[in-house]
Image: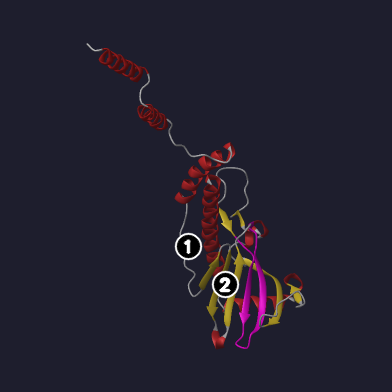
Amino acid sequence: MSKARCVLQSASKLVQASSRLNPPQSRCLSTLLRNQNQFSCVVPASRTFATKGDEEIVKFLTEEIATEKSNQRGLPKLDGWTPKIDGAEVTLTKAGASGEKVIVSLNVNHTVDSAEPDDGEGEAPEMLSKPSFEVDIVKGNGSTLSFTCSYVHADEIPPEAEGQEDLFAIDEVTMYEGEKHSDSCYAVAGDILDGYLYDLFMSMLDERGVTNEFAGNLSDWCTAHEHAQYIGLLDNISKFAKM
């Protein structure tokens, strides 16, 4: 064997040995990437919350919303009235005689209370929404006679008068032209009106559909609407806590 060939063979063996001890860089990168992929598959993706309290709120509201929806009622009909809803604010409109328009406006915020006094025994009384409401009688020329009314609380009705007393009372009466209602408009409290005039005003409302029956139906309607608003609030809070 020639001296040159022996040198070449020795060099070849050294290269092969070096290759076994030091694998190609591409193979090292391939192994690293494969190991990284395996590691990423092991760690599960999970939802994160801003705080632990937010997570607890979402957990509670999930059950609370389901319970409230199971008790939810649809809005009852208010015959003859056209409702317009803007969140908690509600406007009911009805066409009257001789070009008149009757408008009932209210807000259901902070209006839920027990349907009857709670004596602390047995089941809790049903919760009803009984908001104060404005009744505007608007003439064709824009002149408006406005009544502020509120529900009479159950414990204010004497037992012997149940079924005979009005469900609502007139708290205030005022007048204004067009859109010019402001604090400068004079208003008189219902409880200082002449008794006969007060009765005439109640008859005026009765003739325009604002009756005891209407007041009862309105409370049922507001109760359903307020409950829907409550469920909507809980749902929005839950979504907020998940952000």
Q: Give residue 229's position: percent from left, percent from top.
A: 54, 57
Vertical relation: 211 (above or below) 177 = above
The magenta stretch spans which residues? 130-154
Answer left or right for 42 relative to 143: left
Answer left or right for 34 relative to 73: left
Question: Mark 2 sits on what residue?
Answer: 211
Which is nearer the eye, 29 or 72?
Answer: 29
Q: Give residue 67's position: percent from left, percent from top.
A: 48, 46
Vertical relation: 138 (above or below) 42 = below
In primary-sequence order, the first of circles 2 and 1 is 1
Q: Give residue 136's position: percent from left, percent from top.
A: 63, 77
Q: Give residue 30's position: percent from left, percent from top.
A: 36, 30
Residue 138 sits in which quadrant?
A: bottom right
Checking the image for residue 75, the label placed there is: 1
Q: Amino acid at mark 2?
A: Thr
Asked if residue 37 can be seen in this view, the reply is yes
Distance of label 2 from label 1 (alpha carbons): 19 Å
